[in-house]
Amino acid sequence: MKNVFRLLIIAAMAVTFALPALAQTAAATPAAAPEDPAKTALYEKFVKERGDKTPASQKAAFETGKEFLSKYGTTDDQYVTYVRGWVAKYEVALRDFEFNTALDKDPVKAFQLARGVLANDADNLGVYVKLVGAGLANASKFESLAPDTLNYARRVLQLVEQGKTVEQWTPFKSREDALSWSNYAVGANLIKNSPEEAATYLIKAAQSNGPAKTEPTTYSGLAVAYYNGEFKKLAAEYKAKYEGQPETPDGIALYERINQALDRVIDAYARAHVLNTDAMRKKEMMDKLVAVYKTRHENSDAGLKEFIAGVMNRPLPLPGQPMTPATTPSSTGTTTPTTTAPTSGGNTAAGTNGSGMQPAGSTAKPVSTTTTTTTTTTTTGAKPATGAKPAATSAPASTSAPKPISKTRAPVKKAKAGHAAAGH
């Protein structure tokens, strides 16, 4: 990432140092007028310094120009007009130079400088893209950048949707990469407070043609978003309406939806496990996967190895769509997790579409749906521009996996065969 931003700095320096030539091309330099010796001398000093293209001389010309304007700026003549125009261009170039330099050396300062840049150019897509890259790369080090990173990533997606484009998508390699990471950045930053909305963006990242498609934390984050969003919402509804009550078709249908939500959690963790290359992260994802899988299948891991082996070859299961069976565990019972939500801690990955499993042939009802708040933290060293793993700006933290619920529950009336939910 540092190499990428060094290139940015070099490019910014080139713009700054080339400014005199640009100014000369835009308008010829007026010759000094002899009627005011002091004004003439200061003006000629400015012209000489401006004509030297070294950085030191350019900076000196800028300071001389400001002095000239402070003394003679109220005079409306060609000399004042020329100096004012050149100084204004230099200020813009200097601001851009400082912004690009700070992206690598001081991202917090870069985000502060960006406010001034964007105040004068609210549709500057190139600046927004750079800010998203810097926000991802420094997520674990500067958590304070997360809210702005979220907003800037949303702005990137909005401007691109409106047809905006840029010649260079720095620090990303292409438009596809920038969109991929922007969807990832929005999703990662929404997991804590808006998990269901986060899932929609992480799904887009997973379905993109960019690197977030194969980034492990795309899926570990998606697992947490599914669990804390869709799963907990459905479980709470079931608890309120049907827990301990005689079975009904509506209750069975809702319970089937709970199963499918949990299957999507399993699928996401399986992808995060497969895509992780770091041994520690890979094991962490496997531990979470095994815990959730066993919870889903009455403490059995039958069929899990086969599921993992084929997960990347199946479409990504999406909320609201029927699940495609991948394998059938030998156990037939089904329970739902009731404690802390499973969370991600690895790197993100993507892969378009992988399927979850059909619920395992039982219409047993969940008894307890008590949930707890999942804490979040950032992971380390995101380097989206170079293809390295990005740090989720609001990455889910690692907590304990869900535990099976108690089998003790109020007796319920058995469902008739014709009322069993599809796939049971």
Image (cartoon, grey):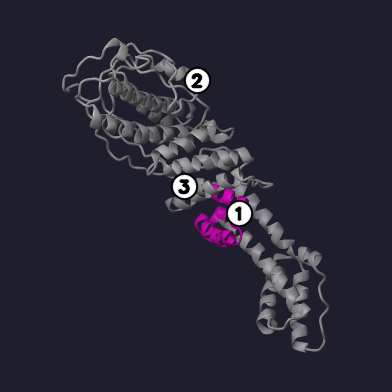
Q: Residues within 10 Å of mark 2 (few under 14, many from 20)?
A: some
**CA distance for labels 3 and 2:** 32 Å
**How many numbered discs sit on the rendered protein?**
3
| Quarter of the C terminus within the rendering | top left
Q: Position of residue 56 (x, y in %)?
A: 69, 68
Q: Position of residue 172 (x, y in %)?
A: 61, 43
Under mark 3, the amino acid is: Ala
Q: Name which residue lies at 68% across and 83% down.
A: 74
Label ID, residue 139: 3
Label ID, residue 314: 2
Badge nearest the viewer, 3 or 2: 2
Under mark 2, the amino acid is: Arg
Q: Which residues are magenta?
A: 103-132
- Mark 3 or mark 2, earlier in chain: 3
Q: Name which residue lies at 78% across and 64% down.
A: 21
Label ID, residue 123: 1
Contact? badges 1 and 3 (CB < 8 Å): no
Magenta span contains residue 128: yes
Dot 2 falls on a residue whose secondary structure is loop
Q: Position of residue 395 (x, y in %)?
A: 42, 41
Q: Name which residue lies at 27% across and 35% down.
A: 371
| Quarter of the N terminus within the rendering | top right
